[in-house]
Amino acid sequence: MAQIDNLPPLRDVIREHGLDARKALGQNFLLDLNLTSRIARSAGKLEDVTVLEVGPGPGGLTRGLLAAGAKKVIAVEKDTRCIPALQEISDYYDGRLEVIEGDALKIDPREITEGPIKIVANLPYNVGTQLLLNWLTVDEWPPYWESLTLMFQKEVGQRIVADPSSKAYGRLGVLANWRCYTDILFDLSPQAFTPPPKVTSAVVQLHPREKPLECPLKALETVTNAAFGQRRKMLRASLKSLRPDAEARIEAAGIKPTARAEEIDVAGFIALAHAFS
Ligand code: SAM
C-alpha cells in the first residue's frame, strides 16, 4: 500500500519526542500505518462524522483516521509527552485534528463535541473495559455515538461478543449485547505492537440497537454483578443477598431458581432486572 501521508515514520517521531512506551499508561504502539489505516477504514464512512480517539499516543491510528478522510478527529491523550508530536499532525492536516490533553475517564465526550460521532481507539488495556462500560451505560438510547471500533486484548473482545454457555459469557457480554450488535472484526498478533504485549489483540465493533428491550439499567448492573460474581452458584444463592424474597422474584421472572448465570440469556437477565428493581 502507498504511503498514507508525508509525515515522518512513527519510529522517527517516537525517537525525536522521546516517547519510550510506559507500561503504567498501557502503551503498546502501532507503528505500521497500513495497519492503522485498516482499522480506520473498518469504522466505515468518516467524511461526515467527528471521530473521538482515546489515547492517540504518537499518532499512528490518528494519521490513519485523517488519511481515511475523517471530517474531524478529537484525540484525548493523558501522556503530556505525546502532545507536541500530535500537534505536528494537527498542523499537517489543517486543524482537522483537535488534541485534548487529559484523562478520557474524566471527560464527557458530549461536552467537547456536537453532532454525530464515532469512537475509534486502540485502548489502553488498564482502562479499556471501564471506558466501554461508560459508553454503554449512558442514560439516553440510542446514544450520542454512532459506533465504537475498539482494540482490546482478544480475551476482552471475546467477553464482549460472548453468547450464553460460553466460558467468556459474563456481565460485559450481557450489557453489550442488550444494547448493541457486537462483532470481532479481526485479530492482531502481539508483533503488530511496539513493545509487543503478551497476548493477541482484537478489533471489536459495536453498533447501537435502535430499540433494545426496555430495562432498568441499575437493576441490570446489580443483578449481573451478583449472578456472575458467583457464577458457579445457582441463582437462588447468588441473588439471595439482593432481596429476602429472591427466589420468588427469580420465579416471577420466568426463570428456574436452580439455573446458573451462564445459562441465562440477555432477555432472561432483563426479566430478572425487572423482577429485582
Ligand atoms: N493509539 C496509539 C497507537 O495505536 O499506537 C496508542 C495506543 S496505546 C495502546 C494507549 C494510549 O492511551 C497511550 O498513548 C496512553 O498514553 C493513552 N492513555 C492511557 N490512559 C489514558 C487515559 N485515561 N486517557 C487518555 N489516554 C490514555
Image (cartoon, helix red, strand yellow):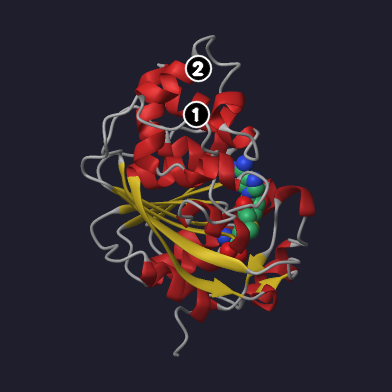
Q: Residue at x 62, y 59 (%)?
A: 155
User: Residue 121's x, y, as percent?
Assistant: 50, 56
Left-right relation of 128 to 196 = left
Name the amino acid, label 2.
Answer: Ala
Q: Residue at x 78, y 54 (%)?
A: 23
User: Residue 198's x, y, as percent?
Assistant: 76, 66
Quadrant of the rendering where the N terminus is positioned = bottom left
Count of numbered circles in the view: 2
Taking depth in this image into account, of 94 and 163 the one nearest to the observer is 163
User: Residue 90's x, y, as percent?
Assistant: 46, 58
Q: Residue at x 47, y 68 (%)?
A: 63
Residue 58 image label: none
User: Residue 208's x, y, as percent?
Assistant: 30, 47
Quadrant housing residue 234? top right
Residue at the bottom extreme of this rendering: 1
Residue 246 image label: 2
Q: Is residue 2 above or below residue 70?
A: below
Residue that mark 1 sits on:
257
Secondary structure under tag 2 reads helix
